């Protein structure tokens, strides 16, 4: 009998890894890294409770590290099969995994320098060579085409609208008289998100594995274009520049697109947009190469090759190009990572711009506790940067409408056309969030729901 085991994203948001076994073939759906609290990160080091060599294939939903970041380690542990993903995910994975390897190597180097590791020398979880090996095993498949992952396990991708290349996975186990149907939601995107299509309606299934990241939270019903236009107009009135800390992959490109639409519509003047992050520059090029994946319902831009590429968009890759931005006066928008201001080039810009009341810092997303982003959000009057205190005199503003995950009512909207599966597993959410969605679907739709525990395994009854 087919069997499904939850090796990650069970009662937590990260580390997605679901092992599906049928007729002796084993396929791993997503191969994510645990992130966040130390207790979670340590799980990346624990031996797997299944044999990497025995897994015949991996199938990925999208390129975020909590869905693909364990791959290099998995390959290091002996996984030799193909790793299926969409074409855009393949390109983004290269950027994401090489960056992740750099972070792992940096962590190990730091532990060695400070001497706080139990192991001498401390080794990285994986390095750039491991990442390159994992990338060689990627095999891209277009959406809407069935492919055989291994044995009787067949898969088909549908757009999830969460990131460039993101997909949900429809699975059929073709061994009985009737196929057994399973659906992995991956991360479900938002309706009307800039650049991304709406998530596809879920295909019918016998078993559903559904994310629950924002199952207890609602996104404010705002018009992103209006909100952004107002914020930039106010920043221009102050006479300085607008600094936007943003994730290099995804958020930065959505912001460039929205700004260009506002300029194209004449609602903003032709102000320069600087993108200061090598990773964001690489990602922007990947986005441009996959323009077939763009949803431009906020506004078409005519006469351009790519909506992210205009004469007012300046991509800074080198350190010199980055330094040159220091001389820029207003009005201008500078987008730099990291998104929560924990590191990266944004810190140099903050050091240079934060103390002037002419400038504006726009927070465009969730700011986790303990980050400079959260401090600014809470009205801190100074910020510690590179060992010194910088007074906060710039205006702090927030763009509320940016999030990659469907909120509570959007998740219900996505699920609404689906007839009751035999069983629905709620994953990829904090425990309270997953339980709340499980209860709601049970109460309002009489669905058979379950919040699996880490390592828990279920037999899937044939149709
Ligand atoms: Zn994601």
Image: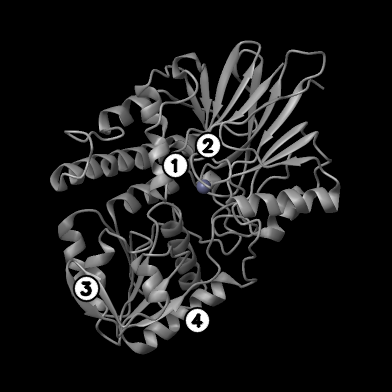
Q: Which residue is mark 4?
A: 230
Q: Earlier in the sequence, mark 1 or mark 3?
A: 1
> Circle 3 sits in a helix, a strand or a loop, which is it?
helix
Distance CA(mark 1)–CA(mark 4): 38 Å
Where 316 falls versus 157 (above or below)? Answer: below
Q: Nearer the viewer, mark 3 or mark 2?
A: 2
Q: Residue at x 69, y 57 (%)?
A: 410
Distance CA(mark 4)–CA(mark 2): 41 Å
Q: Position of residue 213 (x, y in %)?
A: 59, 52
Q: Are marks 2 and 1 in contact (CB under 8 Å)?
A: yes
Q: Residue at x 43, y 85 (%)?
A: 234
Q: Which residue is mark 2?
A: 8
Q: Residue at x 80, y 40 (%)?
A: 448
Q: Residue at x 40, y 70 (%)?
A: 374
Q: Which residue is mark 3?
A: 351
Q: Nearer the viewer, residue 242 or 179?
A: 179
Q: Is mark 2 within 8 Å of ligand 1?
A: no
Q: Position of residue 85 (x, y in %)?
A: 51, 31
Q: Earlier in the sequence, mark 4 or mark 2?
A: 2
Q: Nearer the viewer, mark 1 or mark 3?
A: 1
Q: Residue 34 shows which numbered tag?
A: 1
Where 395 falls versus 175 (above or below)? Answer: below
Distance CA(mark 3)–CA(mark 4): 25 Å
Q: Which residue of the protein is positioned furthest toward the front in this rendering?
A: 118
Distance CA(mark 1)–CA(mark 3): 32 Å
Residue 370 lies in quadrant: bottom left
């Amino acid at each position: 009998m087919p069997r499904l085991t939850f090796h990650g994203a069970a009662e937590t948001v990260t580390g997605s890894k679901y092992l599906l076994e049928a007729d002796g073939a084993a396929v791993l759906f997503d191969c994510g890294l645990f992130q966040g609290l130390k207790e979670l990160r340590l799980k990346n080091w624990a031996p797997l409770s299944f044999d990497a060599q025995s897994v015949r294939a991996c199938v990925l939903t999208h390129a975020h590290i909590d869905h693909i970041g364990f791959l290099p380690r998995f390959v290091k542990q002996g996984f030799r099969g193909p790793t299926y993903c969409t074409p855009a995910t393949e390109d983004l994975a290269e950027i994401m995994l090489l960056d992740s390897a750099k972070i792992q190597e940096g962590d190990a180097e730091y532990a060695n320098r400070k001497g706080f590791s139990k192991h001498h020398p401390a080794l990285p979880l994986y390095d750039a060579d491991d990442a390159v090996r994992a990338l060689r095993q990627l095999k891209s498949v277009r959406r809407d085409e069935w492919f055989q992952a291994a044995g009787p396990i067949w898969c088909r991708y549908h757009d999830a609208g969460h990131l460039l290349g993101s997909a949900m996975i429809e699975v059929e186990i073709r061994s009985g008289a009737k196929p057994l149907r399973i659906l992995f939601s991956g991360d479900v995107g938002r309706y009307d998100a800039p650049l991304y299509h709406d998530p596809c309606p879920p295909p019918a299934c016998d078993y559903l594995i559904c994310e629950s990241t924002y199952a207890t939270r609602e996104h404010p019903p705002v018009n992103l274009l209006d909100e952004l236009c107002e914020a930039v107009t106010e920043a221009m009135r102050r006479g300085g520049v607008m600094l936007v800390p943003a994730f290099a992959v995804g958020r930065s490109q959505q912001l460039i697109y929205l700004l260009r639409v506002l300029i194209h519509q004449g609602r903003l003047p032709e102000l320069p947009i600087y993108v200061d992050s090598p990773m964001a520059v690489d990602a922007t090029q990947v986005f441009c190469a996959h323009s077939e994946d763009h949803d431009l319902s906020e506004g078409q831009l005519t006469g351009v090759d790519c909506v992210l590429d205009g004469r007012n968009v300046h991509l800074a890759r080198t350190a010199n190009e980055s330094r040159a931005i220091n001389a820029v006066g207003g009005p201008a928008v500078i987008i730099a990572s990291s998104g929560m201001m924990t590191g990266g080039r944004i810190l140099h810009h903050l050091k240079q711009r934060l103390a002037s009341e002419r400038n504006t810092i726009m927070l465009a997303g969730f700011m986790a506790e303990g980050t400079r982003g959260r401090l600014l959000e809470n009205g801190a009057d100074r910020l510690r940067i590179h060992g010194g205190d910088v007074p906060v005199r710039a205006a702090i503003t927030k763009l509320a409408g940016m999030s990659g995950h469907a909120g509570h009512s959007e998740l219900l909207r996505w699920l609404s056309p689906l007839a009751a599966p035999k069983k629905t597993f709620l994953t990829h959410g904090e425990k309270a969030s997953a339980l709340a969605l499980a209860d709601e679907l049970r109460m309002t739709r009489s669905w058979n729901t379950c919040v699996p525990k880490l390592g828990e395994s279920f037999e899937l009854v044939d149709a």
